[in-house]
Amino acid sequence: MTTTLASPARMEKAAVAALGMLAVSTGALESVVAPTLPLLQRELDMSPSEGALLNIVLAITGTLITPFAGKLGDRYGGKRVLIRLMAVVSAGGLVSAVAPNLPVLLLGQILQGAMVGALPLSFIVVRTHLPSGASKAAIGLVSGMFVGGSMAGLLAAGPVAEAFSRHWMFAVPTFAVIGFTLLVNRLMPSDPPGRPDDAGLDWPGLFLLSGILVTLLLVVALAPEAGSQPFVFVALIALLAAFVAGWTAVERRSAAPMVDLRMLARPVIWKSCVVTFVICLGTATGVYLVPQLLDVSGDGYGFGLGATEIGFVLLPGAVAATLAGPLGGIWERRFGSRAVVATAALLMAAALLALAAAHSEIWHIAVGKALIALANGLCVTAMVTSIASSVDEGDTGIATSLVLVTRVLGFAVGGMLGGTLLTSGTLPGSEVPTESAFSAGFLIAGVVAVLSLLVVRTMSKGVKE
């Protein structure tokens, strides 16, 4: 172990590069559904609500897996858990690639959701083998390359699906994930277990959190019809409250809780989670609504574009997201986390509100989506980098997991919100959502982003270096 820690150059030049490319590959695999969702809905005969479910099921799995991944990484070593997790992701990608129908594709996406847990495990490995300054840069690099990979997937999925088939848009990034996982396994030095103990995994906490997520998504899906089904809606709210209360009680008493509520209660953690949730809700709303708007041909709105053309419109967003990760890490160290997050919240609010008011030209969509991608990358990178640097090394996995869980929760709620609004905004006998449904989605997410500034004001400035 002493020899491994004494070789940071090998880690920086080879292993971190492999880890970054693995992040690019997983990010690309994560994002291929979004730009091709209209195509998938047509080929698999899905409704907008079913499309929204497909769009966020990966995030749901990620929410459940990530805390366990971070905890197991802190306990048994980041590399060991990372390699096993990527084996599950690879299996999910292959299932998605051969899926003949929606249920099989959903299964593949569920397995792929394990990829969300890869980031905290990468941070554990980086902090173990690099000094503080270098580890911050590496965390920013890996985070940025994951976001950049996501945008690359958004750009390439359409052309691949149209030139070959929807099966290949899953297969290509999956093959890359398999290759770079093998490379990481070979180049990355093994890290020792952090804090071994005899406590088992928190299965009751996992079950109750699953209930919270499923019930929350049902509440969001049924919200537009609450007036016609008031008893069902109230019952779901009551069930959600019961799940939350039960989960809180279980986590407080567990010897090895899935989520350490004492850590979550720390201001730096919960404020970061709130802001991350809001930013990612806005991002997910945009990620869902923009391709749908580009695809439809309504009366005076929409553009009727194909999957490849949609990918080209999203190109500025791909560039912005690729730059956002490294910039977020650099600016967080120079100006502090509060300044970076405030900038991100303002950009997000401006982009969403502008899209609510003006979306009649291609450039409106391209610029708005680019600002959304930039804001998301700046915020998530700054939050993860700040928190990973402010907790004890042994808590890196679980602390960053909390932010990443919040990230996928924001994506899940934002995606379901977009799908629900389009479903409720589709007139009987029509397959095209009304323009007001798109405007409402952008407006709601923009207002929430504005309100997040109230929390940002109370955050600490962060440590400058």
Image (cartoon, helix red, strand yellow):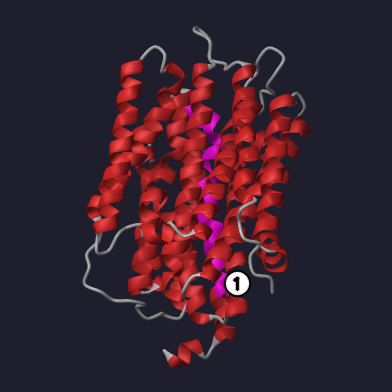
Residue at the image position 24 percent from the left and 58 percent from the top:
253
Residue at the image position 71 percent from the left and 37 percent from the top:
351
* Magenta stretch, main secondary structure class: helix
Q: Amino acid at mark 1?
A: Lys
Q: How many discs appear? A: 1
Residue bounds of the magenta highlight: 16-42
* Residue 306, position as x, y percentages in the image: 63, 30
The residue indicated by pointer 1 is 136
In this view of the protein, can residue 158 be seen by the observer?
Answer: no
Query: Per the image, is 444 magenta?
Result: no
Query: Per the image, is 35 magenta?
Result: yes
> Where on the picture, by quarter, is residue 258?
bottom left
Viewer-closest of 26 and 260: 260
In this view of the protein, can residue 49 be seen by the observer?
Answer: yes
Viewer-closest of 80 and 402: 402
- In this view, 417 is above or below 275: above
Residue at the image position 63 percent from the left and 18 percent from the top:
436
Which image quarter holds the C terminus?
Answer: bottom right
- In this view, 26 is above or below 20: above
Residue 52 is left or right of residue 291, and the answer is left
- In this view, 38 is above or below 406: above
Please tell me whether mark 1 sits on a helix, a strand or a loop.
helix
